[in-house]
Structure formats: C-alpha cells, structure tokens
C-alpha cells in the first residue's frame, strides 16, 4: 500500500485542482495508474447553483493524462452524482480538468493540439498513442471553446482584411489585439453585418474598454466603431495614407514613361526612357534607405522629370511628418502646410486626407498603426499556403486562432 507521504508528493506533482492521489500502480508496458479522490465532500448544482453534500451515486472511470518521464499516465477518477437538496434532482459534479464524455484530460488535449500545429494529425497520433478520431475531437472541443471566448483586456483593436483567394475579390476580415500582437477574430466576410454580429457577441463589457481602433481608409469600419464602441478613437493607419500617395506617384511615373515611348524624336525619347526605366523602386522606397546606386538612379529620374521630382519630395515630406510629430496639434499644422504645397501633385490623396483628417491626426498622440496587423496577415497567408488552401472556412479559422492561442 503506498505511503501517505508518497501520495502527497504525487498529488503535488499531479497539480490538479480539487483532487488528491490516494493510491497508484505501475504496470509494465501499460503505464502509471493513479487513483484519485475528491478533496471536497460537496458539489454545486448546475441548475440552481446551490451546494449539496448528499451523494447519490459513484461513477468511476479511467482517463489519460500527460506522460511522466515518457511513461503513460492514467487517472482513475470518480465523477460523483449528488442529489440536489433544493431541486430534488440528481446532478453530476463538474470536473475542471476533464470535459464531459471525454477519456483524456484538458491539458493532454491542449498538448496534442499544440503538436498538431507543428506536425500532422497522423504523426502525432502515432507518437502519443491516441487515435486520429480522438485528435479530431480534441481540435473540435478547443475550437468550440475558442469561438465562445471573448478578448480579455482588449484596449487597442486593429481591423483589416485579407484575400481568401487572390484576385477573386473574396475577402475575410481580421481582428487583432494590437498590444498583445494576437489574432482575436477572423470572419468569412468583411461586411458591416458580419462584423457587427461578431463584435456584439463580445458584449458591451468588452467593447466599452476599447480605447483605439486602427483601420484602413474604409468608411464602413469607421461607422461600425462609432456605433458599437463609444469610448474608442478611430485611427487611420498611416501606412494606408502613404500607400495612396505612393500609388498616385506611381501612376504619374507610368504616365510619363508611356508618353516618352510615344515620342518620335529619338534623342529626347532615349534620354527620358533612360531616366524613367526601372525607377519605381527608387521613387517609392524611403530615400534614407537607398544605397549609392539607388541615390544615383533617383537623381537621374529627377533630372528628366520635374513633376516626379516634386512628387517624390512631397512623398518624403509627408513621411517625415508621420515620423517626427508627436502630438495632433503640430501634426495638423504640418499636414495643412503639406496640402498647400503639394495639392496639385496629389489631388486624390488631398481629398482623402481632408476627408479623414480627424482620424489621421489621431495617430500622432499614441502612434498606433497596423504594422502588427500586417505581420499577422502574413502569417495567416502562410497558414493558408501550408494547407494548400482550405475548402472549409471553419477549419481555416480554427487553425489560425489556434496558432495565437498556443
């Protein structure tokens, strides 16, 4: 018979709430079997939430737990049935460490799910001596738990989208905790109704805690934040503003290159094309990051195109405003000066900046961006490629959420 000190030590090593080891056996080629007993003599009725100590029946069965020193571990447990003294109806006690109708502990399921993320189901099943069907059940259980869970301590939210299938206009919305760099939601679509449904499921207690929401320049996102998150400041992502400026600059580059190719005078044509060809990289990249060769090419572009020279100057000055200013007041003044100087070169960007000026200057106080979101989007795309695409969106969603859960 095992001694009490040994049982106490095993109980501490097992580290399961509400139970203690009252005996064990070590069987060769099978593993270690620990017999557990409850530390409490009562349980809470799930119907009326009253405590009961009137034992009705014992239900003993054996479940699998995490191995110890590569030895399989099995737990013989008792899910007792009590008779509620208030409802007068029998009920089974809730066990924190194992789900109902499961033959393994929650922590074993979590360990196997983590390994599946780095490997495949078949290999993990062979290593852990469990069936593939059991692993599928574990994944399904964790998935249901993830779907029901709400973000905890969410202060800064990022909303963006990625293409499910490139080039087909099929987008899914991505929700990210910017402070924790963690994916908290992924939706099959990006419509207002789909986003509203997910956000409302989080509950008001989560939504009122959100202080900032970083979005791209898409009005439905802004309207939704204003509708559901009363304490949140909408912040327009600076990189999307710069992206629009860069796109306008690149359109002008293409326009001038096409015009040069139509010239009949060969000497002028050759000079312009020599300067404009392979100029996209040097015009759009941050000037301070260009090497000597890039600087030389940029100088060549400016010599053949005064318009591109001014547009590049405007692009660089706008970037410096975003990099340098640290309060919304100075940011607003600098953006006003920029618009006066470069509005004729960037007419579309000018309209966008004026339309989103409140959300753009909000960036300067906390300097919140969607840089974290873009990094997470890249990882989601990697998951999609590693699975050679996903026919079932729920499986894709589960795989993505699991990566940030563990």
Image (spheres, grey):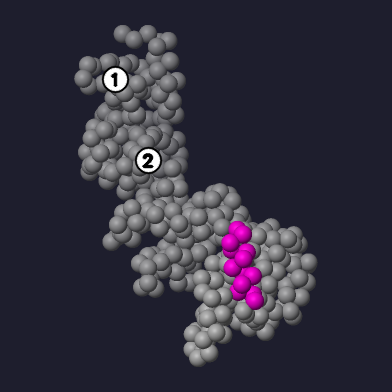
Q: Evaluate whether residue 19 shows in this view.
A: yes
Task: List the residue tagged with mark 1.
Answer: 32
Q: Quadrant of the N terminus?
A: top left
Tell me the residue at 54%/50% (across/down). Answer: 181
Q: Residue lying at the far bottom in this picture: please name it.
A: 264
> What residue lies at 27% left-to-right and 46% top-to-bottom?
136
* Start-end of magenta stretch: 291-303
Q: Quadrant of residue 326?
A: bottom right
Determine the CA span between mark 2 and mark 1: 24 Å
Q: Report the residue at 41% width, 40% height from top.
A: 45
- Residue at 45% x, 20% y is 12
Q: How crowded is the residue under tag 2: few (<14 C-alpha within 10 Å), some, or many (20+)?
A: some
Kindly indicate the quadrant of the structure image that contains residue 10: top left
- Circle 1 packing at 10 Å, graded few (<14), some (14-19), many (20+), is some
Q: Return the disc, 2 or 1, that comes first in the chain's sequence.
A: 1
Task: Using residue 167 as the reference point, say whether residue 344 is left or right of it.
Answer: right
Counting labels gives 2
In-image side of 72 versus 317 (left or right): left
- Disc 1 is placed on an element classified as strand
Q: Secondary structure at mark 2?
A: helix
């Amino acid at each position: 018979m095992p001694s009490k000190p040994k049982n106490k030590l095993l109980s501490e090593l097992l580290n399961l709430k509400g139970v203690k080891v009252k005996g064990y056996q070590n069987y060769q080629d099978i593993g270690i079997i620990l017999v557990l007993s409850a530390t409490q003599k009562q349980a809470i009725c799930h119907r009326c939430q009253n405590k009961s100590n009137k034992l009705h029946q014992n239900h003993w069965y054996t479940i699998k737990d995490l191995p110890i020193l590569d030895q399989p571990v099995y737990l013989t447990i008792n899910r007792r049935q009590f008779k509620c003294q208030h409802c007068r109806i029998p009920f089974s006690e809730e066990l924190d460490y194992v789900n109902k109708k499961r033959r393994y502990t929650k922590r074993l399921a979590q360990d196997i799910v983590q390994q599946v993320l780095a490997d495949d189901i078949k290999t993990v099943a062979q290593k852990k001596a469990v069936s593939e069907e059991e692993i599928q059940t574990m994944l399904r259980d964790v998935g249901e738990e993830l779907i029901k869970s709400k973000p905890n301590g969410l202060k800064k939210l990022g909303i963006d989208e990625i293409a499910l299938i490139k080039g087909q206009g099929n987008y899914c919305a991505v929700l990210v905790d910017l402070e924790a760099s963690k994916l908290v939601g992924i939706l099959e679509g990006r419509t207002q109704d789909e986003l509203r449904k997910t956000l409302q499921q989080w509950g008001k207690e989560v939504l009122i805690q959100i202080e900032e929401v970083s979005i791209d320049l898409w009005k439905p996102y802004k309207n939704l934040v204003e509708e559901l998150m009363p304490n949140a400041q909408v912040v327009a992502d600076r990189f999307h503003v710069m992206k629009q400026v860069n796109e306008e600059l690149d359109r002008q580059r293409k326009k001038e290159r096409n015009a040069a190719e139509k010239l009949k005078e060969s000497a002028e044509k050759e000079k312009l094309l020599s300067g404009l060809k392979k100029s996209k990289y040097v015009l759009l990249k941050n000037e301070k990051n260009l090497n000597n060769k890039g600087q030389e090419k940029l100088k060549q572009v400016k010599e053949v195109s005064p318009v591109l020279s001014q547009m590049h100057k405007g692009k660089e000055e706008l970037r410096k405003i975003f990099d340098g200013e640290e309060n919304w007041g100075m940011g607003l003044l600098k953006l006003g000066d920029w618009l006066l100087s470069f509005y004729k070169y960037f007419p579309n960007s000018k309209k966008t900046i004026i339309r989103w000026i409140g959300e753009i200057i909000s960036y300067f106080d906390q300097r919140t961006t969607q840089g974290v979101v873009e990094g997470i989007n890249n990882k989601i795309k990697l998951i999609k490629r590693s699975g050679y695409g996903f026919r079932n969106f729920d499986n894709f969603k589960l795989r993505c959420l699991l990566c940030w859960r563990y």
